Image (spheres, rainbow, N blue to C red):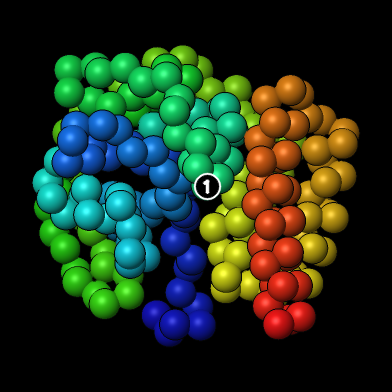
Amino acid sequence: MSAVNKKPETINEIILVTECEDGSPYIAPFGVRERDGLILIAPFRPSISLDNLLSGRRATINRTDDVRVFAGALTGRRNFPMQNKAGALVLESALAYKTLKLEKVEDDTQRPQLYFKVLKEETLKPFQGYNRAQAAVVELCVLVSRLNMLPIEKINSEIDYLRIAIEKTAGDKELEAWAWLVEAVENHRAQLSGANVA
């Protein structure tokens, strides 16, 4: 099959919780793929999550519909309630989780590819699906994670479009998450303006 006709891989947006050297949990949003029966995680360097994953300490995929966790992790807010379920680092808001074991590493100076075997998975609550505001917050999270890679004009136009869903369907949690992300974009804009003036 040619590269042009190759079917794109599905990327699932999840929360990855890894264990730091001091035993504390580290929460980070990630897009993960399934490939050859394994979970593929490819963090950019440098990355605390990458360091934790390579060290062989615990890692757990969490699925949650509380989008504040995604937005919070990107904006320096990581103190979300956790529980330890037989060694798994699980958010209290988790709908489901998977515990992972590192199987293979394809090293790269910029973005190594780490392949994990799922040791255990458990569904805790049914997933009702994201409403439009929740989906908009997750999309803005992706943009915020790429602030230094994308033109500010692209980010501004995407925010204008995503804001429609926020205004129509957001609840308190989504509004709080959105505000954190917009603040991060505004800080980025201010840095760009300062750089241009200097």
Q: Tag 1, which secondary structure? A: helix
Height in image: 147 above or below 71?
Answer: below
Residue 82 quadrant: top left
Left/right of residue 19 with respect to residue 28 in the rendered view: left
Residue 69: x, y in percent? 52, 33
Left/right of residue 110 with respect to residue 137 in the rendered view: left
Residue 34: x, y in percent? 33, 52
Residue 161: x, y in percent? 83, 54
Residue picked out by circle 1: 74
- Rendered residue at 63%/59% (across/down): 143
Left/right of residue 140 with respect to residue 171 in the rendered view: left
Residue 36 quadrant: bottom left
Looking at the figure, which quarter contains the C terminus? bottom right
Q: Front-most of 61 and 39?
A: 61
Height in image: 183 above or below 133?
Answer: below
Q: Given the image, on which type of amino acid does mark 1 rest?
A: Leu
Please state the total of marks drawn on the protein image.
1
Q: Is residue 4 visible?
A: yes
Q: Is residue 38 visible?
A: no
Height in image: 33 above or below 131?
Answer: below
Residue 95: x, y in percent? 45, 22
Looking at the figure, which quarter contains the N terminus? bottom left
Left/right of residue 101 with respect to residue 141 in the rendered view: left
- Rendered residue at 23%/58% (across/down): 114
Q: Give the residue furthest to the front.
A: 198
- Rendered residue at 16%/63% (across/down): 105
Crowding around mark 1 (Cα neighbors within 10 Å: few <14, some 14 to 19, many 20+) is many
- Rendered residue at 41%/44% (across/down): 28
Q: Front-most of 27 and 117?
A: 27
